[in-house]
Amino acid sequence: MINGKTEFLGLLGNPVKHSVSPVMQNAALKEMNLNWCYIALPCRSEDLESVLKSLRTLNFHGLNVTIPHKNIITNLCTELTPLAKRLGAVNTLLPNTNQGWTGGNTDVEGFLAPLKSKNYEWENRSAMVLGCGGSAKAVVTGLKELGIDKINVIGRDKDRLNIFINNLNQTLFDFPKKSKEVSIKGCLATDSELSKSFEKIDLFVNATPIGMTNEKTLIKTTDNIPLGKEIWQKLDSEAILYDLVYTPRPTEWLKLGKKQGYECIDGLEMLVQQGAASLKLWSDKQFIPIDIMRKAAKNALLD
Ligand code: NAP
């Protein structure tokens, strides 16, 4: 029940209509008995600065940030956590004492949660990441944190791929520690040698929207298997496929992967875990009802 004492949390993005975060977060807030309410706030890029100021004045307790503001918002925060600074991307904002916002990032934690829950030795493994956009940054950072030795990023545009690789090799060179030499390399999706390197991959992550139900038309995109069907016969059968996409569940790619006997992870758990990590920061509570959040998100996705 919203009353005079209700405090607010919000999601800033454009669009935000299809986000399941409000349902997921409000289910957790109810369970935690907090008189808080989480709302979706559509915001154009040109309004971002003034909206942020207003929400701070209105004493919003915390914010999530999504497409297309995750990078640009770093310039509007008065403080950044070391991880957000390294990534150059923020998905969680906390009000700070100097009337501004501290920008943090829980995407890496969210991405890693399903991988860390496996009884698996990650050191000296190799991974491939398709895509070099915003979430791929969090993915590569997470893979470095896991201790993965060889990280290959596949992009479709040479210049964007080079910028991405150079940036991350600079910002992550001493992450998580300086001693370990990890190579982050780039490869174009059109490279004729690409399929050969598939034989040695332990983990493959799709960090592109390929296979995602199109938000505007609510139909599936036509090229809905990353890199086409054939290439997936070349992977080691022990490999894990991890799709950040969670609409539909499972994606066509994970359906194919499952049929071929690969272990598959979809994007729902990342969504739930990054949300839970944000709520932990805002509420400063040790216990976050993750099961309730997962159930609420799953139900919202069925609608
Ligand atoms: P983004 O910043 O727009 O980056 C998308 C990347 O995918 C870019 O590198 C883009 O290449 C590439 N790409 C797009 N379409 C492609 C195609 N047809 N073929 C090859 N590459 C293509 O988006 P993002 O924020 O990284 O998000 C990517 C996906 O992850 C989205 O579906 C998003 O919903 C999902 N995601 C899920 C979670 C979660 O919690 N599960 C969190 C974050 C994101 P160009 O640079 O050449 O355009």
Image (cartoon, helix red, strand yellow):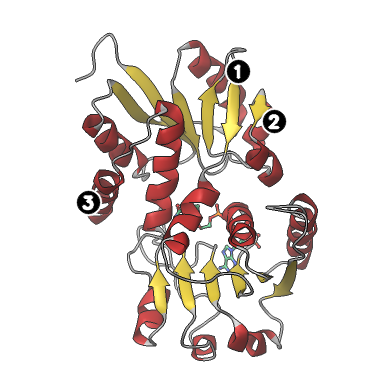
SS category of the residue bearing label 2 = helix
Query: Of residues 149 and 253, which is closer to you in this image?
Result: 149
Please name the residue shown 35% across and 85% down the image: 259
Q: Earlier in the sequence, mark 2 or mark 3?
A: 2
Q: Which residue is mark 2?
A: 75
Above or below 301: residue 55: above
Q: What is the crowding at mark 2: few (fewer than 14 residues within 10 Å), some, or many (at least 20)?
A: few
Q: State the residue in front, 150 or 37.
A: 150
* Disc 3 to disc 1: CB gap under 8 Å: no
Q: Mark 1: is the Cβ under 8 angstroms from ligand 1?
A: no
Q: Earlier in the sequence, mark 3 or mark 1?
A: 1
Q: Which quadrant of the structure image shows residue 211?
A: bottom left
* Residue 118 to residue 125: above or below: above
Which of pointers 3 and 1 indicates the residue nearer the eye?
1
- The structure residue drawn at horizontal position 27% and vertical position 8%, both measured from the top left corner, is 4
Q: Is residue 283 left or right of residue 145?
A: left
Under circle 3, the secondary element is helix
The residue that label 1 is drawn on is: 100
267 to 78, vertically: above or below: below
The residue indicated by pointer 3 is: 299
> Could you say where residue 270 lies in the image, as x and y percent from the top left?
43, 54
